[in-house]
Image: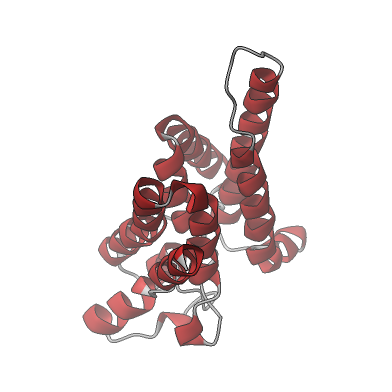
Amino acid sequence: MEIILVFSSSYLSGSVPFGLILTKIFSGKDVRKIGSGNIGATNVLRAGNKYLAALTLFLDTLKGYVPVLLTGYFFNEYIYISALSSFLGHVFPIWLNFKGGKGVATYLGILIAFSYSLSVLFCFTWLILFFIFNYSSISSIFSSLTIFVTTFIRETAQSANPEVISDVHLSKILFILLILIIFTHKKNIINLKNNTEPKIKL
């Protein structure tokens, strides 16, 4: 019963389409008919409002952070299920025929709930790559890859030390989320290959 509660509440939290709701309310636009048609912060930015994009980023981050934080407090053994469920909620929201966002902001929220240091590393890597290439997709994919590799190396080193209690499951969930992020960016990868991926201007 507890696992069902965790899954459903985390999924529903992740499935709230803040980007769509905010652009509808404050600009009267349907973000799904703009740019990539995505409901995330990057496409909200393409709609022409930096403040709505920033608010969308913040709220989409909370969608990952809050359920994982609460699950860790009340049902810690299901914390990874909560992380995956909230991410899937954003990417495949039931309210929008399972056509949601790319999940990067929600991934960041999940990361913050797990580790402040990893979330800082993610943001730092994302910003560096963005200022070099000006592609949100490249920044998101390679920053997620950096987090997985860093966590995997750290856990491998810790498991080799019998005096250190290591949680080897974090790298596993981060690997799953990495694969999902690559999947949600498949069109961007094709566009990058064809040199048709639009750059983001702040």
Is 132 or 96 nearer to us in this picture? 96
Residue extending farthest to the front is: 1
Quadrant placement of the C terminus: bottom left
Q: In which quarter of the image is residue 154?
A: top right
Report the side of 169 relative to 106 (left or right).
right
Q: Quadrant of residue 14?
A: bottom left
Kindly identify the residue that appears in the image at 42 percent across and 80 percent down. Answer: 31
Kindly identify the residue that appears in the image at 69 percent across and 68 percent down. Answer: 187
Is 84 or 150 nearer to us in this picture? 84
Image x and y of residue 195, in percent? 71, 61
Image x and y of residue 86, in percent? 47, 63
Count of marks overlaid on the render: 0
> Height in image: 173 above or below 19?
above
Image x and y of residue 49, in percent? 30, 68
Is 3 or 7 nearer to us in this picture? 3
Q: Can residue 200 be seen in this view?
A: no
Q: Can residue 129 be seen in this view?
A: yes
Image x and y of residue 151, in percent? 61, 32
